[in-house]
Amino acid sequence: MSRFPFPARSRGVAFILVLWVIAMLSILLGSFSMIARTENLQSRHLFDTTKARYAAEAGLNLAIYELRKSDPALRWVGDGRPYTFGYGEAEIEVRITDDSGKVDLNAAAQSQNPAMLVGLFTARGVEQADAEALADAIIDWVDDDDLSQPNGAEIADYKAAGLSYGPKNALFDTVSELQQVLGMNYALYEKIEPSLTIYSGRTDPSAAFASVETLQAMYPEASIEELQMLVEQRQAMAPGDMGAAGLLAPDGTPMMAGGGGVTYSVKSRAKLPNGASTTLDATIRMGGITVGGRPYVILRWRDGETS
């Protein structure tokens, strides 16, 4: 009698079936292992980014505390200079910009003097004719009439461009609203957004707090190297130097380091030892007591990039 109760062909099929089951189990185990590893990495990434985010928020709160100091010699300066410090495991960098050093969209449009806007656009590589048309379109967006500026855009122009809306005929409520103006594109908006505000109310930005890009709009005749050196010299000054140590703007006027407004844009970036980081970008207005008991008001809040 045969030692094997099943025919050879049946034994071969059974062997193949066993191999197939083993292969399927291997694939399932590998899939479960990969899923577990992926979920672990996702959980770790979420934990790290959350940790970094709260560290960045701590940087924002410290900036508010430092801005409220009564002693000008100790108060942090809103001219874009970096302030770095540690918070737990995180390394935090905070940059504060007084919004009086930015181009106010509403003030520029209401003054119907497009020179500042044109300078801002040309400094970012826009051709002169296109910059003038865009500046006039911004004025038309804000003014309450249907009369187009020389190179502007009213309702008929928006319709001709295939858009379902026209000029707002009112002030900008947010800077991001600028993207709706005829002629504006996202690539240009990204470049100019850090130089814009709707909170200062100034027709001319303060050179004491302006960035290099804003200074280019204010002083188009100055070279980029000259303006960069000017900003470096300004940021190297000690806080509270009201006379700006004799520092002069390109037009010869003194750059006063004191003064400014009560609205600030704060960018706080926290980085953990493992490289995870997040950036918090907010605009705050100092003064007064809100319902929550805070001596400031948050006007804009944006969680930035994480890595």
Image (cartoon, rainbow, N blue to C red):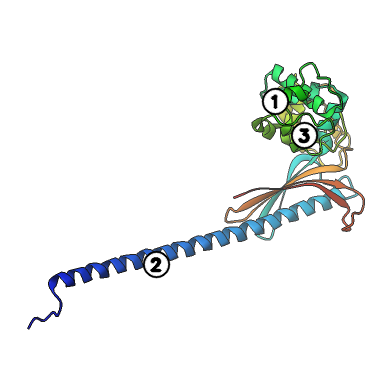
Badge 2 or badge 1: first in the primary sequence: 2
Q: Position of residue 294 (x, y in %)?
A: 87, 56
Q: Would residue 86 be visible to someone looking at this image? A: no
Instruction: In this rendered view, identify the residue nearer to me: 227 or 193.
Output: 193
- Does label 2 or label 3 sit earlier along the sequence? 2
Which residue sits furthest bottom? 1
Instruction: Tell me: residue 154, above or below residue 239.
Output: above
Residue at the disc numbered 2: 29
- The residue that mark 3 highlights is 196
Label 1 – label 3 distance at C-alpha:
17 Å
**Local SS, label 1:** loop
Of all residues, the one furthest to the left in this rendering is 1
Q: Which mark is residue 183?
A: 1
Instruction: Determine if residue 240 is in view.
Output: yes
Query: How far is the residue under mark 2 from the one under mark 3?
Result: 55 Å
Measuring from the top left, give residue 38's x and y in whole percent: 50, 60
